Amino acid sequence: MMKAAFKKGWTNRKRCVATKRNGQPCRRLAMTKYGLKVCGAHGGYAAAVRMGLRNPSRKYLLYGAYYRALRQGKVDRR
């Protein structure tokens, strides 16, 4: 039995409508899951967080203390 004509990969997907700095179109995958026309690199993640659809990762909180201790020489790097 044949399935619907939905192919894996980048086919049948919406592309980012933003323009890169060199004037070419971005053409990365748009964040249509959140109803956006742009990719994550062109403000998609920030827009989704502002709309409350996505939580910020806050990974910087995990590594801040480690790198602060590293600069002060308190971490043994072996």
Image: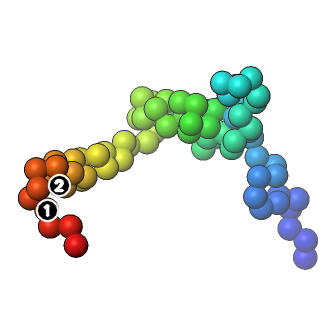
What residue appears at the point 88 percent right and 59 percent down from the top-left corner?
5
Cα distance, mark 1 to mark 2? Answer: 5 Å
Q: Position of residue 31 (x, y in %)?
A: 61, 40
Quadrant of res 40: top right
Q: How is the image coloured?
A: rainbow
Disc 2 residue type (three-letter): Leu
Above or below, comparing residue 17 to residue 74 in the picture: above
State if disc 2 and disc 1 touch (CB < 8 Å): yes
What residue appears at the point 11 percent right and 56 percent down from the top-left corner?
73
Instruction: Please tell me the numbered disc located at residue 75.
Output: 1
How packed mark 2 is, by other alpha carbons closer than 10 Å (few <14, some 14-19, many 20 or more), is: few
Quadrant of res 9: bottom right
Helix, strand or loop under label 1: loop
Above or below, comparing residue 75 to residue 41 in the picture: below
Instruction: Please tell me the numbered disc located at residue 70.
Output: 2
Question: If the image is split into quadrants, where does the C terminus sit?
Answer: bottom left
What residue appears at the point 29 percent right and 46 percent down from the top-left corner?
60
Helix, strand or loop under label 2: helix
Q: Position of residue 66 (x, y in %)?
A: 19, 55
Number of callouts in the render? Answer: 2
Res. 18 visible in picture: no
Disc 1 residue type (three-letter): Val
Q: Of the residues under marks 1 and 2, which one precedes in the sequence? A: 2
